[in-house]
Image: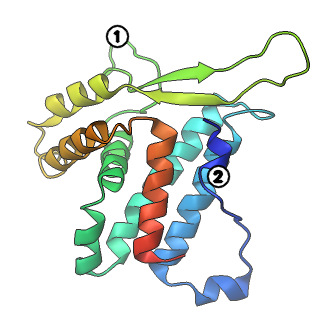
């Protein structure tokens, strides 16, 4: 799947357009911008693992912070979106526990949640394909199980497990597709 086609977003907003956006809509625009930058660095021409991770972390921080800017009724609706709760869990892991896309170290707190797939065409004139993070559901589940006793994680771990189970039942475990669907559903709820 070509990640470039998953979310259509033009990030340039002028000052007049910015001043007309609500706080949640502006934060959503920032999230879409960071997502697009993440996608842009999945290759070619700019396959850059460091920037993939940096923009993914920025995307997760901004998309999840939309929840803090909306009324309580909208928060409850956001929490019913499995893709959103999945992103909340990843943001919480990235913010409080580990860099989610790094390799496993002997001192790592959790197993690596991603593998990186890089498609390369040899011969002919085809260009190098996109690099993608492949999400490891079993490692994520193991991480959530480890975290269930953490006093700060007790609130969000059950929702994250439920979100993972829902996504697996729907057959939706492709990482980039989950992000794109999460953006789509948050956009439907919050607006542009």
- The percent position of residue 174, horizontal first and vertical second, equals 45, 35
Q: Nearer the viewer, mark 1 or mark 2?
A: 2
Asked if residue 168 lies left or right of residue 4, the reply is: left
Asked if residue 95 lies left or right of residue 141, the reply is: right
Is residue 67 visible in this depiction of the protein? yes
The residue lying toward the viewer, choosing from 3 and 107, is 3
Asked if residue 44 lies left or right of residue 96, the reply is: right
As displayed, is residue 114 above or below residue 66? above
Local crowd size for mark 2, using a 10 Å CA cut-off: few (<14), some (14–19), many (≥20): many
Identify the image quadrant of the C terminus.
bottom right
Q: Which residue is mark 2?
A: 36
- The percent position of residue 151, horizontal first and vertical second, equals 10, 45
As displayed, is residue 173 above or below residue 16? above
**SS state under label 1:** loop
Q: Which residue shows up at 57% across the image and 64% down it?
A: 30
Q: Which residue is mark 1?
A: 106
């Amino acid at each position: 799947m070509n990640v470039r086609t998953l979310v259509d977003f033009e990030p340039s907003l002028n000052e007049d357009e910015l001043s007309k956006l609500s706080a949640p809509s502006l934060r959503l625009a920032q999230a879409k911008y960071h997502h697009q930058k993440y996608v842009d660095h999945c290759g070619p021409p700019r396959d850059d693992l460091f920037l993939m991770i940096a923009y993914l972390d920025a995307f997760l921080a901004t998309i999840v912070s939309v929840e803090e800017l909306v009324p309580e009724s909208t928060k409850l609706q956001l929490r019913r979106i499995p893709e959103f709760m999945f992103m909340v869990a990843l943001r919480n892991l990235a913010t409080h526990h580990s860099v989610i896309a790094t390799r496993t170290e002997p001192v790592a707190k959790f197993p690596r949640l991603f593998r990186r797939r890089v498609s390369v065409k040899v011969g002919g004139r085809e260009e190098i394909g996109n690099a993608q993070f492949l999400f490891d559901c079993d490692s994520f589940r193991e991480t959530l199980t480890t975290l269930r006793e953490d006093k700060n994680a007790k609130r969000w771990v059950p929702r994250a497990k439920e979100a993972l189970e829902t996504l697996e039942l729907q057959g939706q475990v492709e990482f980039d597709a989950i992000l794109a669907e999460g953006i789509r559903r948050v956009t439907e709820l919050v607006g542009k």
